Structure formats: C-alpha cells, structure tokens
C-alpha cells in the first residue's frame, strides 16, 4: 500500500485558520445583523404601531366644489375616488374626511390585513370636513392610539400615513411647520386652526393619521396646497375626536337614550369627560348620575374622552345595562346605567320621504327659486334635513340642496317625487330605473348622483 503523501508544511495551521474563519463567519451572520437596533428608529416604531388601524377607502364619486384641488370644470364629474381612514373603535367605526366619502356611491374599505368591506355612512360634518363610517368586521379591529394636539411644537417630527395616489399605507416624514393655520381650499371649503407640515400629503392621504414620534395620532390629514411643495395640512386631533364624539352621539340617539350631556372636550381633551347635565326622568338620572361627575369607565372600557363614552353606548340595545365608574369629588362611585327607547319628543318630525329616502323636503317658492338659481330647471324641492345612515346621506345629498330632477322627470312638487318612486317600485322595468339618477342644485353648481329606492315598502302617500 503506497504511503500517504506527507502534509505540506503549515497545513495544520491553515486548517485551524480556515476553521476559525468559518466559525467567526457563522457567529457574525447567524444572529441579528450588526446595527439592526439602530435601524429600528422611533419613526419605524411609530409607523408599525399605527399601520394596523389605518384603512384605505375607494369608490366612485361625484366631484364637488369642496374637494381639494378640484377644478371648476370638473365639478359634477364622476371619478374613482380614494382616501384614507382611521379605526377609532374595534367594532368598525372609522373616522375620515367628509370630502373623501361625499358623493361616493359605494364606500369600499380595505383594512391593513387586506380584508375588504363595504362601509355605510354613520354621520358627517361638512363644515369641519369630518365623517364617521362603519364596517362590520369579522373580528375586532386594532384602534389607533390617540394623542393630543394641545402640546404640539413647531419643529417636532411627524409622520403622515395614507393611500397616496392609490399606493396603500404610504408613510412620509417631516416636521410640524406651523400651527393654527387658516386655509381656504376652495370656494366651498374653509378650514380653521390647521396643523401645517412638510410631510408629503398627496391626493389619497386625506382622512389618514398624522402621527407624532410616539406613534400617536395628533391630526387628520386633510389637504395639500395646490402647486406648493412641502406644504400640507391636518386637522388637530383634539378637534377631530370632539367632532367624532358629537357625530356618534347623534347617531346613537337614533337607537337608544341615556340622557347624559357631556361637556365639550376643548382644553380638557384627553381627560375623562365631565357630565354637564342630566335630563330629568332619563336613564342617567335613574342611575344616579349627577352634573359634575367625571366618568372614568363604562363597562370594561376606560374612558379618557367623550368619544370613548359615546362609542361604548353604540354597543348597547334598548333595555341593556352597563356599569359606570365615576369620580364625584374625592369619592369613586359605581353606578348602573340602563339605556331606554328614545322618547318621541326627541325624534324629529318626519314626512313620508324620511324613512324611505332619508330626506325631508319642502317646496321652494317660485320667486325664491328664480332669485337664487340661474338654471334651466323650473323649480325644485329644498332638502331641509338628511337622515344619517340613509340612502340620501350615503349618496351625497346634503341639507340645503334643492332636488330638481329624478331620472327624466322634474321634481317641482311632492307629486313629482311620488310618481317617480311609485314607478320604480311598481313598474315592470323597475330594475332598469333603480337606482334613480337624481339632480340637485348646490349653490351655483348642478350635481347628480344615483339614489337606490327600497322596493319592499308600501306605496308613498299620494297628495
């Protein structure tokens, strides 16, 4: 058997060197990468914490004069709109801008985990450009961490998150450039007391959160200055949650009654709400709630602001009870609140179109119509009220609009509306007429949309 060749000089030394190098390489690259902790910055953590509560909103809509960056010639045109929303309650309540959902025929919502839903409008406030919509998720949704806008500082870092140009969950960073800006976006939309930021806010970002470095929502992105670079605006979060609380309170009063009037958040935003008044013979009065009480918990929900109280009430049905924990002076008091049916005197007087379409209408005098509107239409019916969560509200009709036509027929009188509604619900080709195209006058504009008419209800009252 031939002898094995002798090992070359220093072979064992090379083997040891190769072995050590391999082991060192394994040790270096099998664990966390060097510097990874430095990459996980506060901005990364802020975006990560807020992302699950941010939703994307899409849907065909009619452009209105209040939409930022809309040219006058585009008003009334239907386009594929987009925007953003933020989850404020696990049950699926979402805050967004009014102009994002205004005129949208079907509000399509996609959550961060890519589940898709059709949302319904809960309530809205065109003046502040805020709205609350609702989806019905299969599981509770993550809720955004709400901060405060009381202590914002020019120069502090912020992050805007939203559906920029349709690119979902886009995050941009910047600073707070200024506070308390008043901005005239269009002839129909004026904002007071906005946050100005140089974080990029693009079309589609509207309704999304502006975050501080702790990942707390400190504003609702609302507008970008056309033609400017590095100038965007957001509604301060204290204002936004106060409006959202009012919208949810009004929505809740359609279902149940508690009789509690909470003081406005104002400078106390982020603190437990104070009871301003308690209605006589109301559920709250029977529960022992008093003016000046501070509500700190309702059910299992810790109450930090009026919004928390009102969203908890939305989960209750008539006759259902919930525990209250209140602070009364130096004492802590446990109470039980049983919500009741809304008394008749609190319900608005409604006509035949309130339940059917969601609007209250009244004739517009001929001389008033001719004086206020230069149009080819001969007359119309003024919209005096719009019921939240109704077909009319969901499809862009506002209080103050004048309904001038439905399908091919004018709507000068109630009989005109009755004729259209009855034709849709009784005609053999009703499917081809429903939803009905409607036309409204809004200021100097003529807008149109599509209004579904329920076919299962009885005929309208003939006048």
Image (cartoon, helix red, strand yellow):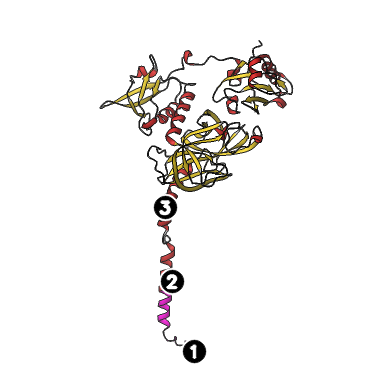
Mark earlier in primary sequence (1, 2): 1
**Residue 91 at least partly seen:** yes
Closer to the camera in the image, 120 or 370? 370
Quick one: SS at disc 3?
loop
Image quadrant containing the C terminus: top right
Looking at the rendering, the stretch of residues picked out in magenta corresponds to 1-19
Which residue is located at x 42 percent, y 58 percent? 36
Q: Nearer the viewer, mark 1 or mark 3?
A: 3
Q: Mark on residue 22?
A: 2
Question: Which residue does the numbered mark 3 point to in the structure image?
Answer: 41
**Residue 142 at least partly seen:** no
Which residue is located at x 36 percent, y 17 percent? 285
Q: Is residue 1 above or below residue 84?
A: below
Question: Which residue does the numbered mark 1 point to in the structure image?
Answer: 2
Q: Label 2 crowding class (10 Å Cα cut-off): few <14, some 14-19, many 20+?
A: few
State how far apart marks 2 and 3 are (Cα).
32 Å
Left or right for 441, reference 334: right
């Amino acid at each position: 058997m031939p002898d094995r060749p002798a090992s070359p000089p220093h072979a064992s030394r090379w083997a040891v060197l190769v072995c050590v190098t391999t082991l060192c390489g394994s040790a270096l690259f099998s664990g966390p990468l060097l510097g990874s902790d430095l990459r996980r910055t506060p901005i990364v953590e802020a975006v990560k914490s807020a992302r699950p509560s941010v939703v994307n909103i899409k849907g065909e809509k009619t452009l209105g004069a209040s939409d930022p960056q809309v040219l006058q010639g585009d008003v009334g045109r239907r386009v594929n709109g987009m925007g953003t929303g933020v989850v404020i309650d696990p049950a699926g309540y979402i805050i967004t801008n009014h102009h994002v959902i205004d005129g949208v025929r079907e509000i399509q919502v996609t959550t961060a985990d890519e589940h898709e839903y059709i949302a319904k409008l809960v309530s809205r406030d065109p003046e502040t450009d805020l709205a609350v919509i609702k989806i019905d998720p299969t599981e509770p949704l993550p809720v955004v961490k709400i901060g405060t806008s009381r202590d914002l500082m020019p120069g502090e870092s912020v992050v805007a998150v939203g559906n920029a140009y349709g690119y979902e969950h886009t995050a941009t960073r910047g600073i707070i450039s200024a506070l308390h800006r008043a901005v005239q976006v269009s002839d129909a939309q004026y904002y007071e007391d906005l946050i100005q930021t140089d974080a990029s806010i693009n079309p589609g970002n509207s309704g999304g959160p502006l975050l501080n470095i702790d990942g707390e929502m400190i504003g609702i992105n609302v507008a970008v200055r056309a033609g400017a670079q590095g100038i965007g605006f957001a509604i301060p979060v204290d204002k936004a949650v106060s409006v959202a609380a009012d919208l949810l309170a009004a929505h809740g009063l359609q279902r149940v009654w508690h009789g509690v009037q909470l003081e406005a958040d104002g400078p106390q935003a982020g603190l437990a709400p104070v009871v301003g008044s308690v209605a006589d013979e109301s559920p709250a009065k029977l529960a022992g709630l008093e003016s000046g009480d501070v509500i700190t918990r309702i059910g299992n929900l810790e109450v930090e602001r009026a919004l928390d109280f009102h969203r908890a009430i939305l989960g209750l049905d008539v006759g259902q009870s919930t525990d209250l924990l209140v602070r009364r002076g130096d004492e802590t008091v446990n109470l039980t609140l049983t919500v009741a049916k809304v008394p008749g005197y609190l319900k608005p007087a409604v006509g035949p179109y309130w339940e059917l379409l969601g609007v209250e209408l009244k004739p517009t005098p001929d001389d008033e119509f001719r004086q206020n509107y230069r149009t080819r239409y001969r007359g119309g019916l003024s919209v005096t009220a719009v019921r939240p969560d109704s077909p009319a509200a969901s499809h862009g009709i506002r209080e103050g609009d004048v309904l001038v036509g439905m399908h091919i027929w004018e709507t000068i009188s109630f009989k005109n509306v009755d004729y259209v509604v009855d034709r849709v619900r009784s005609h053999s080709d009703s499917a081809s007429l429903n939803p009905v195209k409607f036309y409204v006058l809004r200021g100097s504009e003529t807008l149109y949309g599509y209004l579904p008419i329920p076919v299962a209800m009885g005929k309208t009252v003939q006048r």
